[in-house]
Image (cartoon, rainbow, N blue to C red):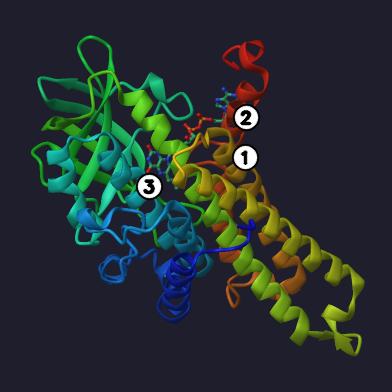
Amino acid sequence: MSLHELTDEQRAIRDLARRFADEVVAPQAPEWDREHRFPRELFGRLGELGLMGVCVPAEHGGAGADYLAYVLVLEELSRADAGVGVTVAVHTGAGTLPILAHGSREQAERLVSPLARGDELAAFALTEAEAGSDAAALRTAVREGRVTGAKQWITNGSHADVVVVFARDEDDRIGAHIVRRGAPGFAAVREEDKLGLNSSSTADLAFEATPAEPLGEPGAGMRIALSTLDGGRIGIAAQATGIAQAALDLASGYARERRAFGRPIGGFQAIQHRLADMQTEIEAARALTWRAARLKAAGRPHTVEGAQAKLFASAVARRQTGEAIQVLGGYGYTKEFPAERYYRDAKVTEIYEGTSEIQRLVIARALLGEAAGDGL
Ligand SMILES: Cc1cc2nc3c(=O)[nH]c(=O)nc-3n(C[C@H](O)[C@H](O)[C@H](O)COP(=O)(O)OP(=O)(O)OC[C@H]3O[C@@H](n4cnc5c(N)ncnc54)[C@H](O)[C@@H]3O)c2cc1C
């Protein structure tokens, strides 16, 4: 099968997501951005379409499709609203899949179906005020099944029903734990005010002797976190590709309509070259993303390929959303067009689920082996 061929199932799921993104998400995205509104009701509708658990097996309430189908959905949703894209990406890739991969059979049966159906939302709580890239420096503690500490910038934090929380035990081992919304001592204490992604929730979480159930073995926390992020990064690459595609669609449509010096600006070579470079880079980002997704779907190693996809696609999104503003000129700088929203939303793809510097570290370590040391 060629790199660009999709199966009938993948194409059908992408088309379903595309239609929903165009008809339901995109028209409301400017308002959600302006009002910083998290559209909770939307995720129930996405759940009814099977889009909150695309790659979750049908026996656990998901659509039972593969990882590529899932990232196709993320690209389509992010093209319409990158905040919606990250909500679904974290819910599925970082919140639901680690429960399936590392939880007991009983945990998977109890917890996953409501998540895959979109009745409940999931979050992934690793980062702390002094533990970001250096996640293993986390200080949140777990003692006798109770978690105490604070997490920062947690996507879906204010709305999640199930939170995967990483904490350190009395033997200094980091483990993964599950905390449910409403558990005693657990609260979302603050919503972050961000540059973009205004329709997503990014919250600080507090835990005070909060009952938690272990996910996986004691001490397996970093392994669970890192393998979750290996897959999650492919989703962020898809998100970045979707944002960049939205910017290209806008800029190329504008170049056909806007006239200067008696002709469409698309007649100027400077504009043509810009659009040609945008399209080429976006295709390359998509190809890297699909390659990594296919490897993951096949159960093959994908750490480096996922890091490469995210590193490249996020830079494309950052750069090309700026180029789209340039094509629109002054209008690109106003809120009349979504170019400025794409530009604000794109930047974070170079930061979360591992900064671009950390992606380079991952790639270089695999390239150089022991000679790379720990890269620090
Ligand atoms: C909108 C948003 C949503 C988020 N959602 C979540 C979430 O759901 N769950 C969660 O756990 N976290 C989440 N995060 C946190 C995110 O993953 C971290 O911000 C990210 O990992 C970087 O950590 P930091 O911000 O502490 O930066 P730092 O680690 O302090 O890094 C600062 C700078 O130093 C560089 N740097 C650090 N270490 C190295 C090194 N070894 N080599 C070279 N350069 C280095 C970084 O690349 C960066 O440029 C979110 C963040 C944002 C902004």
Query: Which disc is residue 353 wearing?
Result: none
Question: Which residue is most to the front?
Answer: 1
**SS for dot 2:** helix
Identify the image quadrant of residue 52. bottom left
Residue indicated by mark 3: 93
C-beta proximity under 8 Å, tags 1 and 2? yes
Percent x, y for residue 15? 47, 74
Q: Amino acid at mark 2?
A: Ile
Q: At x 51% / y 53%, what residue is drawn?
A: 195
Q: Is residue 113 above or below residue 340?
A: above
Alpha carbon separation for disc pair 1 and 2: 7 Å
Alpha carbon separation for disc pair 2 and 3: 21 Å
**Residue 147 seen in render:** yes
Residue indicated by mark 1: 308
Q: At x 48% / y 28%, what residue is drawn?
A: 133
Residue indicated by mark 2: 363
Q: Amino acid at mark 1?
A: Gln
Please tell me which residue lies in front, 202 or 162: 162
Alpha carbon separation for disc pair 1 and 3: 18 Å
Q: Is residue 284 above or below residue 269?
A: above
Please rate how many residues cluster around mark 3, counting C-alpha atoms within 10 Å: few if below 14, some from 14 to 19, many from 20.
Answer: many
Quarter of the image containing the N terminus? bottom right
Q: At x 12% / y 47%, what residue is drawn?
A: 110
